[in-house]
Image (cartoon, rainbow, N blue to C red):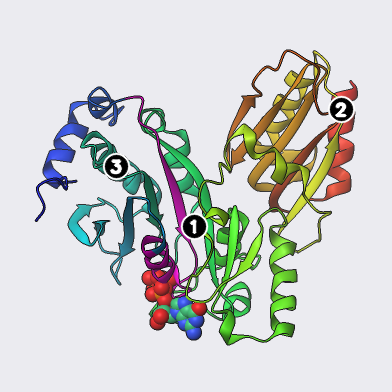
């Protein structure tokens, strides 16, 4: 093995040892050893089982001149308390088994996964991009939040975006949940018919309609329309064997304030009984608007309420326009961030703002009325 290629997770017990030092803040131990000036983008690759995630990763690795670190998250076929963490670096790969403790992706992967990636950075592997492939049955929300929110990690890694790979031939049956039996997996549908595929599409910043060779033009038009009823922000590209111009899926900066274009270009929404996208115009904010807006947003995200309307929000984006500048809001599930625009010293380029929400039960008219009445008072 090449000496220059760093060992990533030498020993799981070592990670646990570190976690044990300060269980309340597991990354802080490692954070000190990290060069804070290094910031590596991480893209989350999500998509249902067999949609072509690994094929895409291979295609990216072959194409780019970037040095990629690829992290594969796979569960065993039982609710095993083990997870395989494989890092590939130009053909070399390291495999470690991380004990998840309770098999729960959300919390258990968080601690071990964060520690492993901190180590990756700390070892200065010389890579400049991380791709993380989630397991096909996973809701990507907790993973996105893990990389976005974690302070220690955020100083070294920033989340660039979520790429959702769809199998053109099977995406409709996944959304109708007749595909839940694939690969012997159990169906993952909620009572109202929301499937894992809905959640993966809802959180996508870009969508690849892969296996395009398996459908005809009519199918393509119908499928795209259906996807847009769920997420009308993310661009959709058709691909075969993950072949795509890398500039369309990497370096999206989808969680930053430079994401203005996607907020501005949002199309009017369609309605789906499960998850849909809505877009609400916001007035020019004055000195009291921000606080009112934030309280309203907190109630919506944390309590699931716009007034008396019960909602469930997966993704939030907003452009808040002020006379002398603007702010961008980014949110994933209950977490949000309000990001200032860099000061230009001149007046704002925007005279109105916009709020884009992807979630369940989003009645655009009722929400717009609620927001307007809050902002007016
Ligand atoms: N016809 C066709 N087959 C494809 C295409 N992309 C991928 N495949 C095939 O689909 C199968 C599944 O692809 P993978 O890349 O392993 O899918 P995955 O999403 O990583 O699968 P899991 O790890 O099981 O979730 C493989 O046999 C691929 O060769 C495509 O565009 N067209």
Q: Name the residue under label 2.
A: 351
Where are the magenta residues, as a range?
36-62
Q: Nearer the viewer, residue 243 or 202?
A: 243
**Quarter of the figure with residue 234:** bottom right
SS class, disc 1 = loop
Q: Is mark 2 within 8 Å of ligand 1?
A: no
Q: Name the residue under label 1.
A: 139
Q: Quadrant of ligand 1?
A: bottom left
Q: Earlier in the sequence, mark 3 or mark 1?
A: 3
Residue 37 shown in magenta: yes
What residue appears at the point 48 percent right and 70 percent down from the top-left corner? 242
Image location of residue 189, percent across then percent down: 56, 68
User: Going by the image, does 38 lie left or right of 297?
Assistant: left
- Given contact means CB atoms under 8 Å apart, are the residues at marks 1 and 2 in contact? no
Image location of residue 71, percent across then percent down: 32, 55
SS class, disc 3 = helix
Give the vertical position of 100 relative to 240 (above or below): above
Residue 1 shown in magenta: no
Image location of residue 359, percent across then percent down: 68, 52
Image location of residue 265, percent across then percent down: 77, 48
What residue appears at the point 29 percent right and 52 percent down from the top-left corner? 102
User: Within 10 Å of the Cα at label 3, are there few (<14), some (14-19), or many (20+) other Cα atoms?
Assistant: many
């Amino acid at each position: 093995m090449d000496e220059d290629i760093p060992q990533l997770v030498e020993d799981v017990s070592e990670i646990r040892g570190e976690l044990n030092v300060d269980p309340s803040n597991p990354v802080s131990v490692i954070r000190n050893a990290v060069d804070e000036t290094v910031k590596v983008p991480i893209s989350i690759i999500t998509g249902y089982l067999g949609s072509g995630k690994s094929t895409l990763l291979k295609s990216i690795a072959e194409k780019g001149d970037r040095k990629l670190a690829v992290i594969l998250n796979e569960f065993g076929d039982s609710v095993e308390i083990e997870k395989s963490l494989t890092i590939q670096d130009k053909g070399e790969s390291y495999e470690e088994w991380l004990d998840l403790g309770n098999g729960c992706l959300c919390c258990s992967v968080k601690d071990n996964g964060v520690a492993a990636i901190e180590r990756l950075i700390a070892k200065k592997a010389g890579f400049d991009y991380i791709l993380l492939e989630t397991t096909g049955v996973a809701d990507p929300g907790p993973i996105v939040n893990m990389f976005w929110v974690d302070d220690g990690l955020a100083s070294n890694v920033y989340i660039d975006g979520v790429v959702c790979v769809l199998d053109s031939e099977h995406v409709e049956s996944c959304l109708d949940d007749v595909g839940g039996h694939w690969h012997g997996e159990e169906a993952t549908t909620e009572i109202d018919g929301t499937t894992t595929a809905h959640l993966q599409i809802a959180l996508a910043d870009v969508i690849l309609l892969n296996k395009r060779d398996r459908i005809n033009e009519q199918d393509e038009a119908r499928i795209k329309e259906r996807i847009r009823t769920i997420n009308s922000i993310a661009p959709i590209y058709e691909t075969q064997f993950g072949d795509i111009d890398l500039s369309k899926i990497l370096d999206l900066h989808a969680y930053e304030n430079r994401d203005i274009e996607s907020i501005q270009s949002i199309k009017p929404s369609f309605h789906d009984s499960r998850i849909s996208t809505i877009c609400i115009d916001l007035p020019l904010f004055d000195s009291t608007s921000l606080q009112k807006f934030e309280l309203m947003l907190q109630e919506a995200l944390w309590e699931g309420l716009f007034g008396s309307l019960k909602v469930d929000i997966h993704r939030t984006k907003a452009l808040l326009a002020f006379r002398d500048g603007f702010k961008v809001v980014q949110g994933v599930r209950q977490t949000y961030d309000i990001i200032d625009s860099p000061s230009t010293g001149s007046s704002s380029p925007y005279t109105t703002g916009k709020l884009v929400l992807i979630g369940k039960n989003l009645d655009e008219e009722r929400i717009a009325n609620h927001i307007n009445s809050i902002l007016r008072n």
